[in-house]
Structure formats: C-alpha cells, structure tokens
Amino acid sequence: MVVIRVRGRVQGVFFRDSARRKAKKFGIQGIARNERDGSVIIEAEGEEHALQQFIAWCRKGPPFARVDAVDVSPLDPPRRFSDFVIE
C-alpha cells in the first residue's frame, strides 16, 4: 500500500484516467486526484509485484505527460479500497 506523488506536466494530459486503466490492468485498487500544486496523488493498494509495475508506469505516464519526479511512501494505515477511482 503506497502513496505516489507524480510531478511534472501531469494535469490535463489524461494522467489520472490512464492511471485508472493501468491500475485495473494490474489489479490495483485506490484513488487518483489532482493537487493544487500541479501534481497528481495516487493512493494504491495491491500485490507488491503489481504495485512495482504500476509505480514503474507512473515514472513514464501517458504519451502527453512529462514526469519530472515520482515520490513513493507507505500508505498508513491502509484504506481497503474496493476499486480504483478518480477524485
């Protein structure tokens, strides 16, 4: 269970929707939301291997995004999501 903050040109380029599709592909539950500072925050829960694949994808993002930095920290306490949604 992790919190992922993605910085760069990640708003207005379908980052959250692309993240939702990738998360569903990897079997990950959670949320993605835009922050006022221009970053995207993702709270993600799933199997460790799937989370690592998802984090690797976040480091690249969708075609029109430019990812400058990705910070990953533990999600504590876990929230027990049932799906992956965009806020």
Image: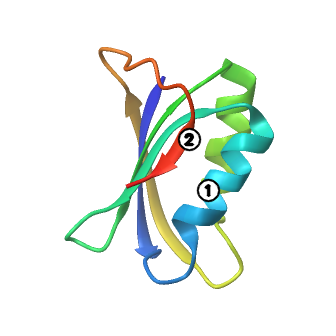
Q: Specify the farthest residue to the right.
A: 25
Q: Amino acid at mark 2?
A: Phe
* Residue at 38%, 16% in the rendered image: 78
Marks 2 and 1 close (CB-CB < 8 Å): yes
- Left/right placement of residue 45 relative to residue 50 reads left
Vertical order, 81 against 18 (above or below): above
Say which residue label 2 marks. Answer: 84
Q: Is residue 47 left or right of residue 12?
A: right
Residue 46 lies, in percent from the top left, at 62, 23
Image coords of residue 40 (percent x, y)? 39, 61
Frontmost of labels 2 and 1 is 2
Q: Give above or below for 7 relative to 23.
A: below
Q: Is residue 70 visible?
A: yes
Residue type at mark 1?
Answer: Ala
Do we see residue 59 in this rendering? no
Q: First in sequence, mark 2 or 1: give its number.
A: 1
Using the image, determine if residue 74 lies above or below residue 21: above
Depth check: give the residue in front, 55 or 19. 19
Residue depicted at 66% across the width and 20% down the height? 48
